[in-house]
Image (cartoon, rainbow, N blue to C red):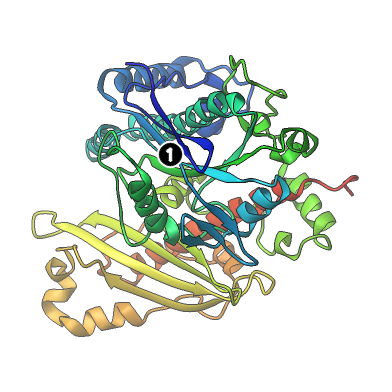
Amino acid sequence: MPVQARLFRVQGYVVIELFDTFPDVSVQPAEYNRLLGYPHDWVLEGRALELAEWARDWYANHGTPWVYACQAERLKLQRDSILIDGQRFSCRPLQKRLEQAAAHSVVLAAVSAGPEIEQEAQNLWQAEKPDEYFFLEIFGSAVVEHLTTMAGAHCCVWAEGQQSAVLPHYSPGYSDWDVGQQPQLLNLIQRLSAHEMPRKLGVFDTGMLRPKKSQLAVFGVTRQVDGVRKLADLVACESCSLVSCQYRRVPYLEAPAYSQGEVVAAFNGVATMNRHTAAPLTQNGRYGFSTKALNRWAEHRLSLKRREDGTTEALFLFEAITCTSMGRPLKFQYHVKFGSQADGYPIREQKCVPHPTGTGPTSICEYSSKGDRWMSAIEQEGPLRGQPLNDVLSWNRTMNAANCHCEPTSRERMWGLVLETIHYALVQQEQTAFQEVGPPARLP
């Protein structure tokens, strides 16, 4: 079934609502390779090629992707916020983009790869098939990116007929847009929609969507087409990988690849341009866990929130099974609060508590003998408290301890896992900030 679009007039101009329950999911190999961590011109072969093709085939047979988008009727840019049909959002990068392009409206989009791929990935993980799990997880992320691109392409088709241009999308969770505003955005989309979304989409209070492989996005719309062409960073085509698009205004620009040394040098070069691009964290540090594992944990188990006072709060969800009591589910939440980036993210607060839905802590052998005193001791533990986050890279701890939380060495290992994941995620954010600012004219 082709994409369905509904056009209607509001205050003299045409607005759009579209939905597609059978969207194209032909993810470009280069995009999939990029998310897998390969260089952009890498050619898969052997086992990697086999797994990549398997993931594509599995999703083609079982996936349920969909795309939905609707245009807001009112957009108002205030001094420190964006009002979309009366709903207030705070995101300085998006606001600046809309102001620069003299945007008169926005299109709100919701896309999803469906719940099946998430469930199958969990089945693979539990079946101890980490390779299949990893390739299917990454393909799900690639599908979501592709669906967002397709939503933008549909908007471009409509905008061309309105003598308008569509700006690159921006989503909660991107730089300086608190993912905690995602429930507001989803509620707004549902309120504006004339039809129900193709399939169910929900959101937790934390901002995480369910199904997990989903995304909300905001596309600015402007009638200042010539002005957008002059502002290179506002041309959606440069960040759109849809190869065969008849509405393309400029070529697609792949993000340049920089070495770790160049990243550090470039950060130093632009530090005076933007204080948020300082690099207090070691960019090429040696972690105790593999970067693939850290990347997976950062994507699926970690949420970061930056506060206006410069502090950063992290929440990490740990899941395993107990080593006794027939392997009951074990869930803990790790809460960490850091000082400012400029000070090197000193660890201010740490706490490990049982997850509300976890059933395992009371089944741990240590709990049976020590009870709440043991739980209280775990909650108060705070290795590296008061030290900068970089110190986790030189922390000498036991790496082969169990996950059960019974012994101090096990709990130290878990704190190391949590802090290394946070370190890795923040380094990725700093590198993203570097790419947004751009490299200096000359590297040292």
* Image x and y of residue 412, in percent: 40, 68
Residue 378 visible to an observer of this rendering: yes
x, y (%) of residue 271? Answer: 80, 61
Left or right: residue 279 versus residue 43 is right
The reply, left or right, for residue 130 in relation to residue 158 is: left
- Considering every residue shown, the one lying at the far front of the view is 12
Which type of secondary structure does the marked residue at label 1 adopt?
A: strand
Decide which of 12, 116 is in the foreground and name it.
Answer: 12
Q: Percent x, y for residue 94?
A: 61, 52
Q: Residue at x 75, y 50 (%)?
A: 437
Whole-percent x, y for residue 116 in the image: 25, 32
The amino acid pointed to by label 1 is Cys
- The residue under label 1 is 70
Residue that sits furthest to the left in the current view: 326
Q: Residue at 33% across / 34% down in the picture?
A: 133
Give the vertical position of 269 relative to 145 (above or below): below
Q: Residue at x 68, y 54 (%)?
A: 96
Q: Give residue 416's quadrant in the image.
A: bottom left
Which sits in the foreground, 142 or 127?
142
Q: Which image quadrant: the N terminus?
A: top left
Tag 1: Cα neighbours inside 10 Å, few (<14), some, or many (≥20)?
Answer: many
Image quarter of residue 169: top right
Residue closest to the far bottom: 373
